[in-house]
Image (spheres, rainbow, N blue to C red):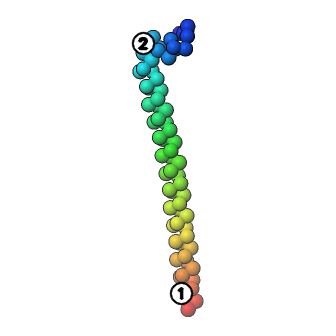
Amino acid sequence: MKFDSLSAFLAMGGYGFYVWLSFAVTLVALLGLVVSSITTRKRLLREVQQKQARAARRKAAQKLENTL
């Protein structure tokens, strides 16, 4: 499809609103997915670090208890 001007390109033969709206909705959904993935990853890594620290503290406490 060949457009004569930028306004004709943006109008997309009368369907521009729907075309650009679909692009916008898709972009928002993809950005939401990226943000959600990043925050979930950070949360999971933080939880793993907390569990490892808790396990290390328990192991140290058991070792100390066994020496007494």
Residue 26's spot in the image, x, y percent? Answer: 46, 31
SS for tag 2? Answer: helix
Say which quarter of the image contains residue 5: top right
Residue that carries the numbered disc 2 in the rendered image: 14
Mark 1: give few (<14), some (14-19) or many (20+) Cα within 10 Å: few
Of the numbered discs in the image, which one, if any, rests on residue 65? 1
Q: Determine whether 1 is above or below 68 in the image.
A: above
**Residue situated in front as seen by the camera: 67 or 23:** 23
Three-letter code for the amino acid on which mark 2 is drawn: Gly
The mark found on residue 10 in the picture is none
Q: Secondary structure at mark 1?
A: helix
Disc 1/disc 2 C-alpha distance (Å): 78 Å
The answer to the question of whether label 1 and label 2 lie on touching residues, with beta carbons closer than 8 A, is: no
Q: Residue placed at 50% from the left, 38% from the top? A: 31
Identify the residue shown where x is 42% and y is 20%: 17
Residue type at numbered disc 1:
Glu
Q: Position of residue 44 (x, y in %)?
A: 51, 56
Query: Looking at the image, is mark 1 or mark 2 earlier in the sequence?
Result: 2
Quadrant where the C terminus is found in the figure? bottom right
